[in-house]
Image (cartoon, rainbow, N blue to C red):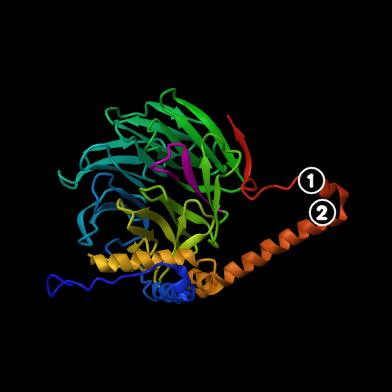
């Protein structure tokens, strides 16, 4: 009996499987409907932040402000965005060249920018549009990264990586290891005394500022465009490579990649970890954005629009719910990290229903129809054609290698190279 007329009727259920012979078939149909609905409601695009006249070539999220994001443009303009309002809250024409790097400072409202005009500038959004401090370098700067809790920052450009102190006008140390030009630099946020850089000679170099020495150098077959450190694991980082792949490395053992992230059909220009360390977002020259599970080799989602051009910068939001992309069409786009996720408040019944549907999809994910629907992603025709051509080339190379091994004793004795080692030439220490 109900105590009040508003109470729900209590339903007695017997979970004995012998009296529910059609339970599996019923739940399979529910799982099929759930995965179809998920694909139907997959609308990841939220908004485009317009305002930059030139392409957006650098972005950074603020580590202490959830809805704050910094962007740098090709015409030297720097903007600070309020993501929830989708508006610019601060802007300045800070450089005479392309803004190649922006990063947050170690205190409150300050952030840093570097450019091809050979300057580094510290800005404070609370004190106006004039720089707080300006540093002059000897060469064009291609990347910048700040120490997490000290007034130190590193810049990459020319034939050296420079370590700067905010209180001095010249670098306190210069690191050189035979590179023609360094392209990017990134501090480890878990172990802040370690940072990494990549150069045009296809190297990735690790440094320790406690000893002012290089730790090790990784040489790859093609150039690395960007580096991102895992915010949870101190020794894991991911690199965006020109060979259309991203590689996850363990800094303690770099002779083999920990994981290879595939699916792009052009050079990967930027990469970023989610704050949980469980997901990776990549932006590519093929005009698509892909989201990967950090433990898997293929993307779980691919985002694109007709108007979006080549992507040069990507970022996860600090709550891991959104992804931002900056492209050379001058727009910054906001995407949902999970394409079919409902925004806003959910009722408790809706939460239980979504959890039940997720459990059903997990239970029946091996079924052919469910797997096919769940993996389907609409892609632009040129990307689809390039992907088909790339797969044909790779399969032809594999077939050729197998034929060589079958008909040549010398080739048969050669040791097979694992996929995770193919892109690595060697490691120097």
Q: Quadrant of residue 50?
A: bottom left
Find disc 2 in the rendering and name its residue. Answer: 405
Q: Is residue 408 left or right of residue 2?
A: right
The mark that comes first in sequence, 2 or 1, is 2
- Residue 146: give x, y in percent of width and height: 34, 37
Secondary structure, mark 1, is loop
Mark 2 surroundings within 10 Å by alpha-carbon count, few (fewer than 14), some (14 through 19), many (20 or more): some
Q: Residue at x 44, y 52 (%)?
A: 271
Q: Is residue 84 left or right of residue 278?
A: left
Marking on residue 243:
none
Residue 344 shown in magenta: no
Q: Residue at x 33, y 54 (%)?
A: 320
Q: Is residue 67 left or right of residue 271?
A: left
Image quarter (top left, top right, bottom left or bottom right) of the C terminus: top right
- Residue 422: give x, y in percent of width and height: 65, 48
Give the extent of the magenta segment.
228-242
Regarding residue 303, the answer to whether it shows in the image is: no
Image quarter (top left, top right, bottom left or bottom right) of the N terminus: bottom left
Q: Residue at x 36, y 74 (%)?
A: 41
Secondary structure, mark 2, is helix
Find disc 1 in the rendering and name its residue. Answer: 414
- Residue 8: give x, y in percent of width and height: 20, 72
> Farthest residue in the top direction?
211
Closer to the camera, 201 or 397? Answer: 397
Evaluate if marks 2 and 1 touch, with contact meaning CB atoms under 8 Å apart.
Answer: yes
| Picture layout, residue 32 above or below residue 268 | below
Q: Residue at x 58, y 72 (%)?
A: 385
Closer to the camera, 425 or 409? Answer: 409
Q: Quadrant of residue 425?
A: top right
- Residue 110: give x, y in percent of width and height: 23, 41
Q: CA distance from mark 2 to mark 1?
A: 8 Å
């Amino acid at each position: 009996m109900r105590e009040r007329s508003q109470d729900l009727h209590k339903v007695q259920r017997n979970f004995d499987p012998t009296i529910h012979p059609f339970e599996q078939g019923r739940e399979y149909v529910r799982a099929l409907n759930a995965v179809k609905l998920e694909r139907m409601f997959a609308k990841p695009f939220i908004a485009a932040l317009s305002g930059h006249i030139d392409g957006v070539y650098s972005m950074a999220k603020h580590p202490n402000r959830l809805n704050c994001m910094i962007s740098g443009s090709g015409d030297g303009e720097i903007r600070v965005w309020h993501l929830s309002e989708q508006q610019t809250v601060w802007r300045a024409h800070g450089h005479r060249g392309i803004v190649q790097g922006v990063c947050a400072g170690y205190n409150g409202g300050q952030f840093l920018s570097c450019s091809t005009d050979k300057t580094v500038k510290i800005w404070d959004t609370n004190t106006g549009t004039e720089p707080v401090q300006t540093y002059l370098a000897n060469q064009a700067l291609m990347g910048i990264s700040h120490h997490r809790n000290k007034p130190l920052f590193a810049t990459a450009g020319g034939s050296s990586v420079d370590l700067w102190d905010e209180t001095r006008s010249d670098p306190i140390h210069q690191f050189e290891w035979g590179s023609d030009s360094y392209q990017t630099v990134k501090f480890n946020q878990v172990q802040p005394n370690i940072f990494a850089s990549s150069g045009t000679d296809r190297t990735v170099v690790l440094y320790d500022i406690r000893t002012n020495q290089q730790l090790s150098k990784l040489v790859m077959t093609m150039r690395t465009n960007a580096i991102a450190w895992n915010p949870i694991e101190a020794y894991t980082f991911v690199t965006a490579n020109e060979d259309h792949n991203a590689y996850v490395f363990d800094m303690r053992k770099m002779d083999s990649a920990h994981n290879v992230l595939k699916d792009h059909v052009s050079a990967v220009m930027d990469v970023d970890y989610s704050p949980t360390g469980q997901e990776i977002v990549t932006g590519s020259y093929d005009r698509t954005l892909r989201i990967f599970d950090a433990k898997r080799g293929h993307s779980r989602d691919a985002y694109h629009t007709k108007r979006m051009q080549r992507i040069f910068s990507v970022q996860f939001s600090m709550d891991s719910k959104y992804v931002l992309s900056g492209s050379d069409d001058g727009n910054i786009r906001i995407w949902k990290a999970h394409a079919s996720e409902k925004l806003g408040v959910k009722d408790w019944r809706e939460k239980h229903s979504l959890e039940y549907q997720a459990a059903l999809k997990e239970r029946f994910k091996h079924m052919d129809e469910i797997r096919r629907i769940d993996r389907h992603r609409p892609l632009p025709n040129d990307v689809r054609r390039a992907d088909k051509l790339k797969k044909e080339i790779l399969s032809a190379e594999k077939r050729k290698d197998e034929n060589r091994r079958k008909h040549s004793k010398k080739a048969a004795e050669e040791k097979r190279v694992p996929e995770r080692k193919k892109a690595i030439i060697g490691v120097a220490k």
